Amino acid sequence: MKNTTPCILIVDDEPLNIKLLDIVLKKNGYQTVSDTSGARARALALDHEPDLILLDVMMPEEDGYTTCELLKQQSQTADIPIIFISALTDTSSKVRGLEVGGVDFISKPFDKAEVLARVKVHLKLRFTYRALIEAQAQRLAQVQDAQQALLVLPSDLPEAGFAVHFEPVLEAGGDFYDVLHVGGSAFDYIVADVSGHDLGTSYITSALKALFSQNCNLVTSPAESLTMINSVLCRILTGGTHITAGFARLSREQRTLHYINAGHPSPILVRAGGEVEIPQASGDILGVFDSVWFEPLVISVNPGDRLFIYTDGLIEGFGDKKMTREEGLAQLAATCGKHRHLPLAQAVEAIHAALAVPGMPRGDDTILLALEV
């Protein structure tokens, strides 16, 4: 049976401080692990996956701020709440602690009652978050709708300004897209690709439709939405199944495009003036790791700019004409630029036809979704 006793990692270069915290926490029923070095503590965090970290700021070689930032960059440790405990009491030090990813700040010399109270609050928040994930996973286990009925059409949401060509090929294929109005002039555009076939296509895409609808809104960033969605997918996907996704949030009023890449092929940005760009962003795939990390891109856009998001079936070649991803991406980028003068819907069809010649054998589904600012 899995041990349900909360585990807390204590990091402080003063052994006496560690000893005091260790006694207080163990006396109140918690497990502890500890180290005097930030670098070694990061290794401990990977090994033990603690529920919470108490972290000193002023340490030799690697200070607590650096340790926190590095922990937040690792998928396995990114969502562990970190409480700073430090002799630094000025506002700027506390603010910096929150900016690098800490959830709270306790001043030294610490009071054991305060430490216990804050630990309890943040553990309760963490366990509530986990319970929410589990509840969503259980609800999604009942979803049985078919894939095609879930896909939004440009005519259903004309104000979103998008066009799409979706051509499923395999019965067990798993390509998916959605477009959501999240408020004001902001819309979310998602293209996803399911790898592995241990669940029916309709089940997975139904789950994705529900998850994006539940977790996409103006107060939640695209990275935060994908993090929540990943937590649920980790509980419903098995047998090696994983998902890649491209996620764009466009605010036409602010003329900004936020893009998150979850292990997906890079999008194509065609400027109104004809310049073709390939925005590069890193990010973890979905449904495999309990914690994931994404590199958000914020792109300034202007009316007439177009963004193309697609699945990898479109850049891997068809029939006997196979290509590397790099070759396929270069060909897609050039083709998108070539057809920039056509109306958006016509451009999408022309681009798809140029790359996926009708009648030529292909081995994967294809999606090409374009949005225009």
Image (cartoon, rainbow, N blue to C red):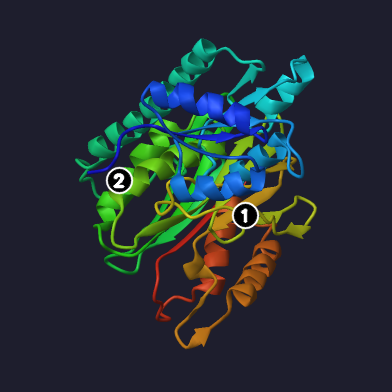
How many numbered markers are drawn?
2
Seen at 71% across and 47% down, the residue is: 305
Q: Quick one: SS at disc 2?
A: helix
Residue 139 x %, y %: 24, 35
Say which amino acid is labelled 1. Answer: Ser
Rounded to the nearest whole Å, what is the CA distance between mark 2 and mark 1?
26 Å
Asked whether, in this view, residue 176 is left or right of residue 17, the answer is left
Camera-nearest residue between 44 and 91: 44
Tell whether 362 sits left or right of 150. right
From the top left corner, tell me how far across and down residue 48 is, in percent. Answer: 45, 46
Q: Which one is nearer the viewer's eye here, 313 or 157? A: 313
| Residue position marked by numbered label 1 in the rendering | 282
- Residue at image location 66% in from the left, 41% down from the top: 67
Query: SS at mark 1?
Result: loop
Quarter holding the N terminus is: top left
Residue furthest bottom in the image: 320
Choose top left, top right, bottom left or bottom right for residue 206.
top left
360 or 60: which is nearer to us? 60
Q: Is residue 185 visible?
A: no
Q: Provide the residue designation for mark 2.
A: 206
Amino acid of disc 2: Ser
The local crowd at label 2, few if under 14, some if 14 to 19, many if 20 or more residues have their Cα within 10 Å, is many
Which numbered disc, 2 or 1, marks the residue that appears first in the sequence? 2
CB-based contact (under 8 Å), mark 2 and mark 1: no
* Label 1: few (<14), some (14–19) or many (≥20) C-alpha neighbours in 10 Å: some
